[in-house]
Amino acid sequence: MVYNKIMDYSNKSFLERRPQRLCKMCGKCCRLATTADSYQDLLSKADSGDESAKEFLDTFEPYETLEDALKADEITVKNIPDWKNRTFYYCKHINNDSNLCPKYEERHTVCRTFPTSPWAVTPPGCGFEGWLFQEREAHKQKIRKLKEEQIYYKAKLKTEITKKEKNLYEKLIKQIDARINLYAKYGSKDW
Ligand code: SF4
Ligand code: SF4
């Protein structure tokens, strides 16, 4: 079954595949970060014991104003969707003279895992840009192949087939739909 072969594309997770050597250690992602949650929501989550929120706030401080964030890195700020309504943060630990991380060995997961997915928004010029593009394209290619397979299964359902085959094709069609939906927020319906 081609479907299974495609699903076994790689046993390594995104973070295991990510080549850390591509990081230029420019510090841009340390000087400008943002989250989908508002600052107030992050504070509430941290108060409720959410470890990710606690780690983020233990690492980052919000810029006082949007203008301050724009002064720090206008290009990166304007590269973020809905930037006018976001809070931007800077790392309170980075050494501004050496540009080095004084907490490198014990840095939090939020730092260890950046960029966290092929769709992570990285600062322009980030060393991972090209590799993330390749990862996104690989995902798109997999989804396109699955869609081709799904067309084949749907066509088979219109032919003379056994009940067992019908059940199998219907199951595979649903599995492929679920896979496509995993990437819906990145536009997978149109890939
Ligand atoms: S912006 Fe990219 S290249 Fe620069 S430090 Fe962050 S991950 Fe590394
Ligand atoms: S703790 Fe280190 S790696 Fe994390 S944002 Fe600050 S300087 Fe960057």
Image: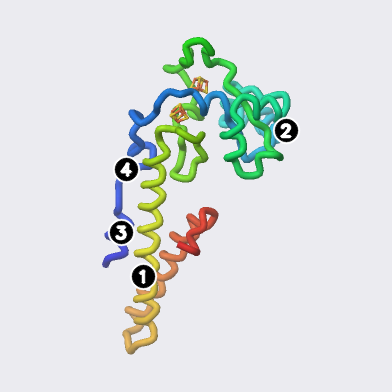
Which amino acid, by three-letter code, is at mark 3?
Ile
Which amino acid, by three-letter code, is at mark 1?
Glu
Query: How is this picture coloured?
Result: rainbow
| Residue that mark 3 sits on | 6
Q: Residues within 10 Å of mark 4 (few under 14, many from 20)?
A: few
Dot placed on the residue nearer the N-terminal end, 4 or 1: 4
Dot placed on the residue nearer the N-terminal end, 4 or 2: 4
Q: Nearer the viewer, residue 78 or 20?
A: 78
Q: Nearer the viewer, residue 16 or 83?
A: 83
Q: Residues within 10 Å of mark 3 (few under 14, many from 20)?
A: few
The kind of secondary structure element at disc 1 is helix
Dot placed on the residue nearer the N-terminal end, 3 or 2: 3
Q: Is residue 10 above or below residue 124?
A: below
Q: Are marks 1 and 3 in contact (CB under 8 Å)?
A: no
Q: Mark 4 or mark 1: which is in front? A: 1
| Residue that mark 4 sits on | 12
Dot placed on the residue nearer the N-terminal end, 1 or 3: 3
Q: Are marks 1 and 2 in contact (CB under 8 Å)?
A: no
The kind of secondary structure element at disc 3 is helix
Q: Is residue 96 above or below residue 175?
A: above
How far from the left and from the top, in percent, is residue 9? 30, 53
Q: Quadrant of the N terminus?
A: bottom left
* Real-space Cα separation, disc 4 to disc 2, in angstroms: 36 Å
| Residue that mark 1 sits on | 148
